[in-house]
C-alpha cells in the first residue's frame, strides 16, 4: 500500500510545478511580446521640438519638404479579384482580400498565372502624376500578400518569374519618372507577408505570429529584397515601410543601416518600427492643427487602396484641393493613392480628379510647393462646447472657409468660400505692400486698408476659381 503522506506530497509537488510553469510561461510570453513590439509611436503632434528640428534640418528631406504632393500606387495581384472572392463581395480595403477572405496561400498564389496587365504604360502613369502636379511617386513593390511586383532573385513569387506578363513594371516606371523629374519611391511591406510561414500576419495558414521565426523571414526575404530594391533601382526618393508588427528597434536598424549604406540620400518613412526621416499620420488622418517637423498624410481617393471594382466613392476635385491645401497649411505632405486595375489601367475617375487638381496647381502652385504653414490657426475651426466624438472627447468642428500658406515676404490666403465684396484678416503681423489674386495673369493690385493688425482687402465680385481662389499678400 502507498504511504498517504507521500501521495499528498507528490500531488502538491505536481500542482506547484504546473502553477510555476504557467506563471513562468505567461511572463515569458509577455516579455517576448513586449520585446517584439516596436516602441509606441508618438501621436503625430506629440513629437519633441528637438525631434522636429532634427527632421527639418535634415538635408536629405529638403526635396520632400518642398514637394507637398505625391502619388501613391497600390498595385498587385489583389487587383484581379478586385474586392470579390468566389462571387462574394469582401468588405474592407481591396489589397486585404487575401486576409479578409482567409484565402489559403496555395489558392491565392494561382492569381499570379492570370496577372497580365497588357494595358500598363509607365509613360502614361508618370504623365498622370506630372499632370496632377505631383512631385513624387510611391508604388507597392511588395504589399502584405508577399508578391513582388519587381524582378527578384530572392523569391520567384514575383511579376517577372510567376506571371505571363514577364516584364518588370518598376524598371519602366523608374525610367518614366526620371524623365519627368518625379522622385521614384518604393513601398515595401517589411513585416506582414502572408505568403511566408514566418512572415507576420498569415494566421490562417501558418498559425499565430508569436510562434514564428520572424528573424528567419527578415533574413531570408525582407532584407535581401530591400537590398534588391536599393541596388537595382534608383536613386530612390524614399522607402515607405508599413505596419511594423513584430518589429523592434534592432530589427528596424538592419533596414535603416542598409538604406544608409546603399542609398545615403534615400528617405525612410515613419512606419519601419524604428527612427525614420519623417512621420506618417494614420491613413486619411489630417491633424486639426499645425504640426512641426516633417510628416505626410497617406490617403485614399475613394475608400480603398488596391483596386475594387465597385468602390465608386470618389473624392471630388474640390475636396482633394481642400485637403492638399489644408495639409500644406499645417506643415505636411499629401500622398494620394490610386489603385490600378489588373489590366494596368488607372481608373478613369481617379485620372479625371487628378488632372483637375493639376489644372488648379498650374495656376496656384506658388501657394503650395515649398511653402510654410499658416501663422494663424483660427481658420482650422474649434472644439465644440457641446458635441463630443465617438471617444467622448469634445468634437473638433472644422471650418473650411479659408487657409493660409506662407513663404518669406508673402502670405497666400486660400479662399474656399468667396466672400462678398471683401476679406478681413485679424492678427496680420507686418505691413502689407501689395494684394492680388494668383489667378489674375495681370496681377492687378487690389485695394486694401490696414489698421494695426486688421486688414481688409476689396475683392472682385466673382471668384476666379471654383475651388480655391488664392489671394497673395506681399509684405514689406
Ligand atoms: O495595411 C496597410 C494598407 O493596406 C495600406 O497599404 C495602408 C496605406 O497607408 N497602410 C496599411 C494600413 O495602415
Image: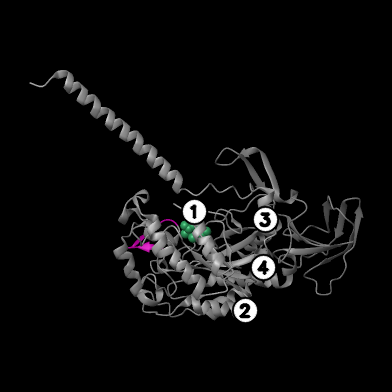
Image side of residue 379 versus residue 319, left or right: right
Asked which secondary structure carries label 2, the reply is helix
Q: If you read the primary sequence from the N terminus, does the residue marked by circle 4 or circle 2 appear first?
A: 4
Q: Residue 139, relative to residue 248: is it above or below?
A: below
The residue where tag 4 is placed is 63
Which one is in front in this view, the residue at disc 2 or the one at disc 1?
1
The residue where tag 1 is placed is 250
Inspect the magenta stretch and tell me whether residue 40 lies in it. Answer: no
The residue where tag 3 is placed is 54
**Image disc number at residue 217:** none
The residue where tag 2 is placed is 180
Do the numbered discs 3 and 2 sit on residues whose CB atoms are within 8 Å? no
Q: If you read the primary sequence from the N terminus, does the residue marked by circle 3 or circle 2 appear first?
A: 3
Other-residue count near label 3 (Cα within 10 Å), few / some / many at <14 / 14–19 / ≥20? some
Question: Horizontal and vertical percent for residue 439?
Answer: 77, 70
Q: If you read the primary sequence from the N terminus, does the residue marked by circle 1 or circle 4 appear first?
A: 4
Question: Horizontal and vertical percent for residue 161?
Answer: 37, 76
> What is the C-alpha distance between the residues marked 3 and 2?
30 Å
Q: Residue 121, relative to residue 439: is it above or below?
A: below
> What is the C-alpha distance between the residues marked 1 and 4?
28 Å
Amino acid at each position: 500500500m502507498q504511504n498517504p503522506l507521500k501521495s499528498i506530497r507528490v500531488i502538491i509537488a505536481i500542482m506547484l510545478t504546473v502553477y510555476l510553469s504557467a506563471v513562468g510561461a505567461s511572463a515569458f510570453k509577455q516579455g517576448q511580446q513586449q520585446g517584439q513590439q516596436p516602441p509606441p509611436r508618438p501621436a503625430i503632434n506629440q513629437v519633441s521640438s528637438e525631434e522636429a528640428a532634427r527632421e527639418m534640418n535634415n538635408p536629405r528631406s529638403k526635396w520632400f519638404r518642398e514637394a507637398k504632393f505625391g502619388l501613391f500606387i497600390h498595385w498587385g495581384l489583389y487587383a484581379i479579384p478586385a474586392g470579390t472572392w468566389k462571387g462574394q463581395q469582401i468588405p474592407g480595403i481591396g489589397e486585404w482580400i487575401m486576409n479578409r477572405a482567409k484565402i489559403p496561400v496555395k489558392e491565392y498564389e494561382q492569381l499570379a498565372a492570370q496577372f497580365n496587365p497588357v494595358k500598363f504604360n509607365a509613360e502614361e502613369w508618370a504623365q498622370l502624376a506630372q499632370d496632377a502636379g505631383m512631385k513624387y511617386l510611391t508604388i507597392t513593390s511588395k504589399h502584405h500578400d508577399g508578391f513582388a511586383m519587381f524582378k527578384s532573385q530572392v523569391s520567384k513569387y514575383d511579376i517577372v518569374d510567376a506571371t505571363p506578363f514577364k516584364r518588370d513594371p518598376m524598371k519602366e516606371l523608374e525610367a518614366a519618372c526620371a524623365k519627368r523629374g518625379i522622385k521614384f519611391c518604393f513601398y515595401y511591406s517589411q513585416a506582414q507577408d502572408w505568403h511566408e510561414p514566418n512572415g507576420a500576419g498569415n494566421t490562417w495558414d501558418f498559425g499565430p505570429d508569436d510562434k514564428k521565426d520572424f528573424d528567419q523571414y527578415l533574413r531570408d526575404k525582407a532584407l535581401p529584397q530591400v537590398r534588391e530594391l536599393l541596388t537595382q533601382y534608383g536613386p530612390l526618393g524614399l522607402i515607405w515601410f508599413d505596419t511594423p508588427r513584430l518589429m523592434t528597434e534592432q530589427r528596424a536598424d538592419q533596414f535603416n543601416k542598409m538604406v544608409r549604406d546603399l542609398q545615403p540620400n534615400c528617405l525612410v518613412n515613419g512606419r519601419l518600427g524604428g527612427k525614420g526621416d519623417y512621420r506618417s499620420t494614420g491613413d486619411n488622418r489630417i491633424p486639426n492643427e499645425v504640426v512641426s517637423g516633417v510628416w505626410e498624410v497617406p490617403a485614399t481617393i475613394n475608400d480603398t487602396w488596391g483596386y475594387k471594382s465597385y468602390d465608386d466613392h470618389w473624392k471630388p476635385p474640390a475636396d482633394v484641393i481642400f485637403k492638399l491645401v489644408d495639409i500644406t497649411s499645417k506643415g505636411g505632405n499629401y500622398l494620394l493613392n490610386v489603385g490600378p486595375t489588373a489590366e494596368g489601367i488607372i481608373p478613369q475617375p481617379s485620372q479625371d480628379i487628378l488632372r483637375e487638381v493639376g489644372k488648379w496647381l498650374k495656376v496656384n502652385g506658388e501657394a503650395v510647393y515649398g511653402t510654410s504653414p499658416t501663422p494663424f490657426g483660427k481658420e482650422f475651426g474649434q472644439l465644440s462646447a457641446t458635441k463630443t466624438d465617438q471617444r467622448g472627447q469634445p468634437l473638433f468642428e472644422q471650418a473650411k472657409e479659408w487657409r493660409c500658406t506662407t513663404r518669406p515676404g508673402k502670405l497666400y490666403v486660400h479662399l474656399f468660400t468667396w466672400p462678398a465684396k471683401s476679406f478681413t484678416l485679424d492678427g496680420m503681423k507686418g505691413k502689407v505692400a501689395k494684394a492680388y489674386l494668383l489667378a489674375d495673369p495681370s496681377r492687378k493690385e487690389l485695394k486694401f486698408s490696414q489698421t494695426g493688425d486688421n486688414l481688409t482687402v476689396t475683392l472682385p465680385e466673382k471668384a476666379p476659381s471654383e475651388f480655391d481662389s488664392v489671394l497673395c499678400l506681399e509684405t514689406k
